[in-house]
Amino acid sequence: MYESDRQYPGLKRRIRGSGHETWVYVYSFRGRDRQFTIGQVTLTQARKIAARLQHEVAEGRDPQAEKLAQREAGTFGELYARYVEEWAKRRNKSWAQADYLVRSHLLPRWAKLDAKSITRANVRAVIGKIESPTVANQTLAAASAVFTFAIRMEVIPHNPCKGIERNPTQSRERVLSDSEIQLFWPELTAPLKLILLCGQRPGEVQRMLRQHIKDGWWEMPGAADPKTGWPGTKNKESHRVWLVEPVREIIAASSVGDSGFVFNRGHLDAAMRGICAKLGVADRVTPHDLRRSWATRAAELGVTRLVVDRVLNHADRSVTGGVYDRYAYGPEIQRAMERVAARVLALAEGRAAGGADIVLGVFSSKA
């Protein structure tokens, strides 16, 4: 049973069946009802504490969250480990990329810091040392996700990433030129070669499972599968693409034991940065740029936009495309992937002239 105080309506005396009495302060914070246990004190003491709590809430603070944070936050390293296991792995299919950023830029500096002691100045200092504006923005977002989780779990009261401006960025238009394809090809790792030959998303290529390869097609379920580690497709739509013979050869030569995955869990962004540094390429290339390069070659060869979008698994939210058009475009996808792969390989091997007319399998660019 609760009895409200007349002077402070949020101050309530809780009386249990046993007759035990304690004071609590009830308040609303960001639309949620909260309760702060004051304990066994006199009415005068309870009112003084209620006045202080009322003032803290008016300043935008959450007294109960701060109280919990004092005893449960732990170090940032401990908080991050909890975030990964309790939240990221279960709800964020792209968590591995964020994990790489946190381990590269945040844990070396914050792992042993008390999580609740990290300030906005600490965040600015770390983010400011990251040269790439895009990577800096992504790292800030990863850090913010960790602190947001901590607030949700009521182990810290504030997110120190809030209010920090992100770097201005421009949409990337980087595409490998014909000569760059020949330059980069010998240095590309197997998954990077697949992105350039197939045009698929880097994260999905990295997590390719052998069980999804059927009769020359790579069939990707839209939904994530925690049992196998498949992250699901970005738009949650099932998707399939044709694997040309050179791609099947790359897959056959790749092995990671009995895990079911085709490739090891390397970091493709780091691999591309290393390749660019080795080749002395100032205008860096990302794994996604390889996907964009595939789409560009497809357009050059006259592949229709509709088929390119089907290969890239771009969401089609139009009534015609998303509701009524259930045709799978299998032959068109197969033909497009044969043609683009032939062109890319011709450029990679220095056979640019006439490369678009090279035949792979049963399809040619003139079909």
Image: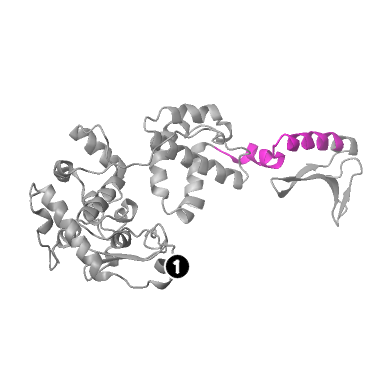
**Residue in front for this viewpoint, 313 or 118:** 313
Quadrant into which the N terminus falls: bottom right
Q: Which residue: 23% across, 70% down?
A: 331
SS state under label 1: helix
Image position, residue 259 (x, y; %): 30, 59
Q: From the viewer's perspective, is residue 44 above or below residue 354?
A: above
Image colouring: one colour
Image position, residue 126 (x, y; %): 45, 29
Q: From the viewer's perspective, is residue 334 above or below residue 7?
A: below
Farthest residue in the right direction? 6
Q: Which residue: 89% across, 35% down?
A: 44
Query: Which residue bears the numbered disc 1?
Result: 319
> In the shown orientation, is residue 92 left or right of residue 157?
left
Q: Is residue 55 magenta?
A: yes
Quadrant for residue 45, please give it: top right
> In the shown orientation, is residue 39 left or right of residue 195?
right
Q: Main secondary structure of the magenta part?
A: helix
Quadrant for residue 177, please give it: top left
**Residue in front for this viewpoint, 360 or 48:** 360
- In magenta, the rendered stretch is 47-74
Amino acid type of the residue that numbered disc 1 sits on in the rendered structure: Val
Q: Badge 1: few (under 14), some or many (20 or more) residues near its Cα, within 10 Å? A: few
Quadrant for residue 325, please give it: bottom left
